[in-house]
């Protein structure tokens, strides 16, 4: 935990830059007012923060930034009252941040393994920090594969990173969109069918999967059928959260609280929780 | 152990009033309903009043409260946050052992997990607790089955037991002892401890048959609730009767779910409010955008009873979440207060 | 003691609560354990009423529109502005001016508004939003028994052996009454639900008869016919206490079993069993929605006639029980909020009544009934609206054309956008007032906090308006107003704020628990019915019957609910999933259309079409569909084309065709 207390009371941050990603999705770069040089709190890949939009409320949002070398930022799709209010802000405006909270991705435990990322649509947001981390530390891992799916080419997240990843040596990047459209000469079809078509490693492999429930279930089915164990499939869960510190109980699933025990779980854990994804 | 004459017992409250705002059982005149509430005049307090309609939970975890307020000036690019924690000195006078157990659950949950809840910590920081032994149980009580009564064993500064013409006063903390000494209370003979035990035994024997016949009637279902080995039809039967009013959570001494909202107080200012919430509400787990992982009402019901009755949740409270006060049975518009739910699950186990 | 007892004022149940009042603010709420109706229970609305009472969305100052903008004004200026403007228009029988009263106002406020309209501004064009829903029910019951209110009693639900729930999602709309029914059923009463949708109360019933839309009338008529054919009706009761039985029996004799099965979609055997169970029970009650829409007159008449023939009216544990949605809907009619009524359902056209009121008020009153504001919408030049919900959207074009609109209320509302003057009033906890619940129970709720700076209670505002218009009213308090009401209203004769001070208040007439056939003095008359058993039929071209639901979704658009967080979140649940509204269809139809939940579809009727998302649910039968009419975004031109259908109330249907988009 950082020395700045922000468990209950948010600390104030300034939006330094806003980037349009895809329709309804924007990235907000932040500088922290009370910290030297506006420097961000230390984060772990896979964690989340609680973001206050003044006058509208607070919401939980995963951190896409690479802990080692990225500027601190949030990528947010507008879905409700608060996220809409955030989208109405511009550079220079203030917001509040609590956190980071949550467990983060288990990089130590997966050293030496092959890594497969499967992301559907904005499911790439919480996986981005992990991808960036793995890219920086390529030598620690075996084969690295990226499967990204979106409904249309316009809905592909982080286009500026995609080019970088496609070009990165040792990265096998596959991108698909749901249906053929003019000006798209890449793969088409759902992402889980794409996995089947490619020769993916199964032994000593860990898969990170994130995306809408339908896509998630289809991908899990495919991966487990191919022989990847449920304990080697990792995802990050999204739940309705209010406090972030394990008290409000909104994110309780069975015996676990997504905010403090998660949000990163293996599929084996998720399965025993007994709720829909 | 000390003694105080019955006619003087409220002097303890009066002594506390010098340093604390005193809360205790008061019978509301018009409705004859006992409410646990703050008093100006200690004479309003009634240690013989029936169990309060509402547990004193609201004193440490209010129905709704402001935890901070803020202003923001978009034009000037300025924001200012002011925390608003309540750390005023409060004394709970005459709290029943079930309700005290509820506060112990809340303490362990809010203060004892990975993070400490600042809002709650401030409420609890400067508190004095005087418990009151139930020498006669009330109709709906079953604390003997949940190990939370009829007399408190921990968590109090002073514990009162009605011995007939006087009260036995046990100190549970240094703070309690100091107060008793300061008031110059008479020391009690050790033999009175036995007399207290006898009074408690007599009280236990007066509980409703369901609680006295088999004190393990609740613990038998704990295993099933933890493992989930309960026929879905039982939850459906229970869920069908839930009208989603949230009352069971609101009156539960150990339920602590809350919601957070930021109502605007002017164009450029808002308060951050914490309000009670209930897992029985459909909107409770619904995410922005509409996806709700927990949809059918029976899902949400099983969630609450998991909290009250499972080993997993008990680990957080170091005891079962249910404290046997029976209030959920009072307020439930269905017929699914916790004792009934236990009965339905047991019926299922028998079959 | 900081807990103050009072009455919840969301719905027509009238539950008792204790408010935690400190430093002139409400800090919490708790149910009143020994309240005769709620007995220590509250619903999600009641448990969170403090959110409403602490809202920042109050109207905090009188406002006058100047150059298009509402600007702050004093009460004096705003009231003068109102009176000057209203004085411009023609009086008496004119169609130029109208008053739209609120079913949430207290009896005292509504009485004064009624008096203001008739005696000061000389118009009888005064009505409630919920015209004609509850009014239709009251007309039927009043014509039959002389009692314009629930014939039974909520307190006697536990004494009833047979409970029939017709077309009301009661555990959502009036949850505590739903609870009372559920508990009675658990204790042994036979509960049967007849509804087009599979509601929670249906699941809790012994039998659930899922009926095709538009066929309630036929089901009720058939139940009566079975009873009569099998000689199970209470012949002795009918002979001793009723009139007009033969006419009723004749009107249903032509019903044929096969026809009934086809039209209702319910096997005749199950209807027969229900009729027998109803007849054999020693006591029986029926509950139906009577709030924002309710049934048409014919359906209500058949329900009433069925229970009269069964001898289940006017006895202990019996009754025909309309359930009001809004807290003071019953009280509003009691106070004469109707173009043709004075208080206590006394007709304006009755010379003696008119004389009595004229004498008390010191004016000569116009005995010609006015019109409903809704019937005059396109002719009115000026309108006064009190504390209103969002149904304005239906009439927004007419209202924006009016020369003068005044809005009176405690909470901000869309109506303010169309108002030329806005007059704030205090809320129900800032003044004394009485409210009459669905079972005619008049309850007093006392002032608990001081109103915000400069805000006055409704009754004082009306006194002020009268004074500006040159009439001096000398009420010193709401209690004085009630004394005048009691003087003029036979049913309220023994009611005063003193007699209401006990918990639970007092029911009219004069404390009677329910209608009593033995004491009634006159025979109960069967309601005239027409032997017309036609139902809306689907055709090959328009194969699906679209049901138009209002009451179920009433709370979504309720102006009070919009000021809360938790209750709004809960009642809005469906709407958040389907923000543009939805049409509910059965899984079978969804399969045929090849659509899944939340897919867009196009709904086409002979008169128009609209697009909406589908909700796939087994709550509706195959080939029926349900649309929540009260959703803002759905009140499109499509519904405007079907205004006449909508007037038929809860049972209105439109044959449509649904296609995937």
Image: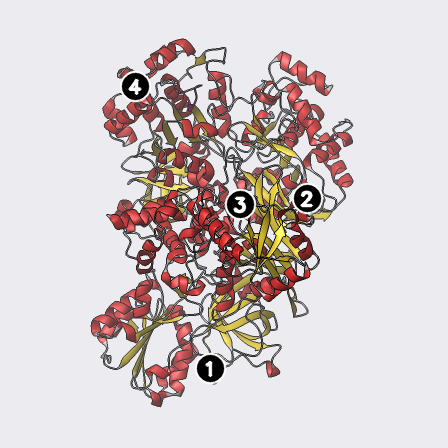
Q: Decide if residue A48 is on the left or right side of residue B121.
A: left
> Disc 1 marks which residue?
A67
Question: Which residue of the protein is positioned furthest toward the top in this rendering?
Answer: C239
| C317 drawn magenta | yes
**The magenta segment:** C314-318
Would you say the residues marked 4 and 3 are in contact, meaning their CB atoms lie under 8 Å apart? no
> Disc 4 marks which residue?
C227
The nearer-to-camera label among 4 and 1 is 4
Q: Which mark is residue C11?
A: none
Return the x and y of residue B344 as percentages of the image width and height: 32, 46
For marks 4 and 2, give the CA distance: 55 Å
> Disc 3 marks which residue?
B53
The quarter of the displayed image where residue C445 is located? top right
Chain designation of label 3: B
Q: Are marks 4 and 3 on the same chain?
A: no
Q: Nearer the viewer, residue B26 or C256?
A: B26
For marks 1 and 2, give the CA distance: 54 Å
Q: Is residue C549 visible?
A: no
For label 3, the SS is loop
Return the x and y of residue A22 as percentages of the image width and height: 44, 69
Q: Are marks 1 and 2 on the same chain?
A: no
Chain designation of label 4: C
Q: Decide if residue B272 is on the left or right side of residue C166.
A: right
> Disc 2 marks which residue?
C449
Return the x and y of residue A209 as percentages of the image width and height: 33, 72
Q: Earlier in the sequence, mark 4 or mark 2?
A: 4
């Amino acid at each position: 935990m950082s020395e700045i207390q922000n468990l209950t009371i948010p600390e104030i941050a300034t939006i330094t830059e806003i980037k349009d990603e895809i329709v309804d999705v924007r990235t907000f770069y932040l500088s922290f007012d009370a910290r030297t040089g506006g420097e961000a709190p230390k984060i772990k890949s896979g964690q989340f923060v609680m973001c206050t939009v003044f006058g509208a409320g607070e919401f939980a949002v995963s951190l896409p930034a690479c802990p080692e070398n990225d500027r601190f930022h949030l990528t947010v799709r507008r879905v409700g009252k608060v996220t809409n209010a955030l989208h109405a802000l511009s550079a220079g405006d203030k917001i509040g941040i609590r956190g980071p909270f949550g467990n983060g991705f288990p990089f130590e435990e997966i050293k030496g393994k092959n890594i497969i990322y499967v992301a559907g649509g904005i499911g790439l947001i919480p996986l981005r920090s992990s991808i960036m981390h793995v890219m920086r530390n390529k030598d620690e891992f075996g084969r690295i594969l990226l499967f990204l799916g979106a409904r249309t080419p316009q809905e592909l997240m982080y286009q500026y990173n995609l080019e970088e990843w496609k070009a990165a040596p040792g990265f096998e990047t596959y991108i698909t969109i749901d249906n053929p459209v003019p000006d798209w000469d890449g793969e088409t079809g759902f992402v889980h069918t794409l996995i089947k078509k490619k020769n993916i490693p199964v032994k000593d492999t860990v898969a990170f999967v994130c995306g809408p429930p339908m896509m998630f279930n289809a991908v899990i089915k495919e991966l487990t059928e191919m022989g990847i164990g449920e304990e080697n499939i990792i995802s990050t869960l999204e739940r309705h959260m209010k406090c972030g510190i394990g008290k409000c109980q909104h994110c309780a699933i069975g015996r676990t609280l997504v905010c403090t025990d998660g949000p990163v779980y293996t599929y084996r854990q998720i399965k025993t929780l007994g709720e829909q994804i | 152990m000390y003694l105080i004459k019955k006619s003087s017992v409220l002097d303890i409250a009066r002594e506390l009033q010098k340093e604390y705002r005193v809360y205790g059982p008061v019978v509301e005149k018009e409705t004859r309903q006992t409410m646990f509430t703050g008093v100006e005049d200690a004479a309003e307090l009634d240690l013989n009043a029936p169990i309060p309609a509402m547990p004193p939970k609201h004193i440490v975890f209010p129905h709704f409260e402001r935890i901070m307020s803020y202003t923001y000036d978009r034009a000037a690019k300025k924001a200012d946050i002011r925390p608003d924690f309540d750390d005023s000195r409060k004394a709970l006078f005459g709290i029943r052992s079930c309700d005290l157990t509820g506060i112990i659950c809340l303490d362990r949950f809010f203060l004892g997990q990975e993070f400490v809840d600042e809002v709650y910590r401030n409420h609890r920081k400067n508190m004095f607790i005087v418990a009151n032994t139930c020498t006669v149980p009330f109709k709906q009580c079953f604390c003997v089955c949940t190990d939370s009564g009829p007399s408190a064993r921990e968590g109090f500064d002073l514990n009162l037991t009605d011995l007939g013409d006087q009260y036995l006063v046990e100190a549970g903390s240094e703070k309690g002892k100091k107060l008793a000494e300061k008031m110059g209370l008479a020391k009690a003979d050790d033999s009175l401890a036995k007399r207290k035990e006898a009074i408690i035994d007599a009280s236990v024997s007066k509980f409703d048959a369901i609680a006295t016949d088999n004190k393990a009637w609740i613990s038998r279902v704990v295993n099933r609730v933890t493992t989930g080995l309960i026929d879905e039809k039982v939850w459906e039967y229970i869920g069908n009767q839930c009208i989603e009013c949230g009352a069971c959570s609101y009156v539960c001494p150990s339920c602590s779910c809350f919601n957070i909202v930021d109502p605007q107080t002017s164009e450029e200012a808002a308060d951050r409010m914490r309000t009670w919430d209930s897992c029985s509400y459909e909107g409770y787990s619904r995410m922005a955008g509409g996806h709700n992982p927990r949809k059918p009402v029976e899902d949400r019901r099983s969630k609450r009873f998991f909290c009250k009755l499972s080993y997993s949740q008990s680990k957080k409270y170091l005891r079962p979440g249910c404290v046997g006060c029976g209030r959920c049975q009072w307020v439930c518009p269905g017929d699914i207060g916790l004792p009934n739910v236990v009965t339905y699950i047991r019926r299922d186990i028998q079959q | 003691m900081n807990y103050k007892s009072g009455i919840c004022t969301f719905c027509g149940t009238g539950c008792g609560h204790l408010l935690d009042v400190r430093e002139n603010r409400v800090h919490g709420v708790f149910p009143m354990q020994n309240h005769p109706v709620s007995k220590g229970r509250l619903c999600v609305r009641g448990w969170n009423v403090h959110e409403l009472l602490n809202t920042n969305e109050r109207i905090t100052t009188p406002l006058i529109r100047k150059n298009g903008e509402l600007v702050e004004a004093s009460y004096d200026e705003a009231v003068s502005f109102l009176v000057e403007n209203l004085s411009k228009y023609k009086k008496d029988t004119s169609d130029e001016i109208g008053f739209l009263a609120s079913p949430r106002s207290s009896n005292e406020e509504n009485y004064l508004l009624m008096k203001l309209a008739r005696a000061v501004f000389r118009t009888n064009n005064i009505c409630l939003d919920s015209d004609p829903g509850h009014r239709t029910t009251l007309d039927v019951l009043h014509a039959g028994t002389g009692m314009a209110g629930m014939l039974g009693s909520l307190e006697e639900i536990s004494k009833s052996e047979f409970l029939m729930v017709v077309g009301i999602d009661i555990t959502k709309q009036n949850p505590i009454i739903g609870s009372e029914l559920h508990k009675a059923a658990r204790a042994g009463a036979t509960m049967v639900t007849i509804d087009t949708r599979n509601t929670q109360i249906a699941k809790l019933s012994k039998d659930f008869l899922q009926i095709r839309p538009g066929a309630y009338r036929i089901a009720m008529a058939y139940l009566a016919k079975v009873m009569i054919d099998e000689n199970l009706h209470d012949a002795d009761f009918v002979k001793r206490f009723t009139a007009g039985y033969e006419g009723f029996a004749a009107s249903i004799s032509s019903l044929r079993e096969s026809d009934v099965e086809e039209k209702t979609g319910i096997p005749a055997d199950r209807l027969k069993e229900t009729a027998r169970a109803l007849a054999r029970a020693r006591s029986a009650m029926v509950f139906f929605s009577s709030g924002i829409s309710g049934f048409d007159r014919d359906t209500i008449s058949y329900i009433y006639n069925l229970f009269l023939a069964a001898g289940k009216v006017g006895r202990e544990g019996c009754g025909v029980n309309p359930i009001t949605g809004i807290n003071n809907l019953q009280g509003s009619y009691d106070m004469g909020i109707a173009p043709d009524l004075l208080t206590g359902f006394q007709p304006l056209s009755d010379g003696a009544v008119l004389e009595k009121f004229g004498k008390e008020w010191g004016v000569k009153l116009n005995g010609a009934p006015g019109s409903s504001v809704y019937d005059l919408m396109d002719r009115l030049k000026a309108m006064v609206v009190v504390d209103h919900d969002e149904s304005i959207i239906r009439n927004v074009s007419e209202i924006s054309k009016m020369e003068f609109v005044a809005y009176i209320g405690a909470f901000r509302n869309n109506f303010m956008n169309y108002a030329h003057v806005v007059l704030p009033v205090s809320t129900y906890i800032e003044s004394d007032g009485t409210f009459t619940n669905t079972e005619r129970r008049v309850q007093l709720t006392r002032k608990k906090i001081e109103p915000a700076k400069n805000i006055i209670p409704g009754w004082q505002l009306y006194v002020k308006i009268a004074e500006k218009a040159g009439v001096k009213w000398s009420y010193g308090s709401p209690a004085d107003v009630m004394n005048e009401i009691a003087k003029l209203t036979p049913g309220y004769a023994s009611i005063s704020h003193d007699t209401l001070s006990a918990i639970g208040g007092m029911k009219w007439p004069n404390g009677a628990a329910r209608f009593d056939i033995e004491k009634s003095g006159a025979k109960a008359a069967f309601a005239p019915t027409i032997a017309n058993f036609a139902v809306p039929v689907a055709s090959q071209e328009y194969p699906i019957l679209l049901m138009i639901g209002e009451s179920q979704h009433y709370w979504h658009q309720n102006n009070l609910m919009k000021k809360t967080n938790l209750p709004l979140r809960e009642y809005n649940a469906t709407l958040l999933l389907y923000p543009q509204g939805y049409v509910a269809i059965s899984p079978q139809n969804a399969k045929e259309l090849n659509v899944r939940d939340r897919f867009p579809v196009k709904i086409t009727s002979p008169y128009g079409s609209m697009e909406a998302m589908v909700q796939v649910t087994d709550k509706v039968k195959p080939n029926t569909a349900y649309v929540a009419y009260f959703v803002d975004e759905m009140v499109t031109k499509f519904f405007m084309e079907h205004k006449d259908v909508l007037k038929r109330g809860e049972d209105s249907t439109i044959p449509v065709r649904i296609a995937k988009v």
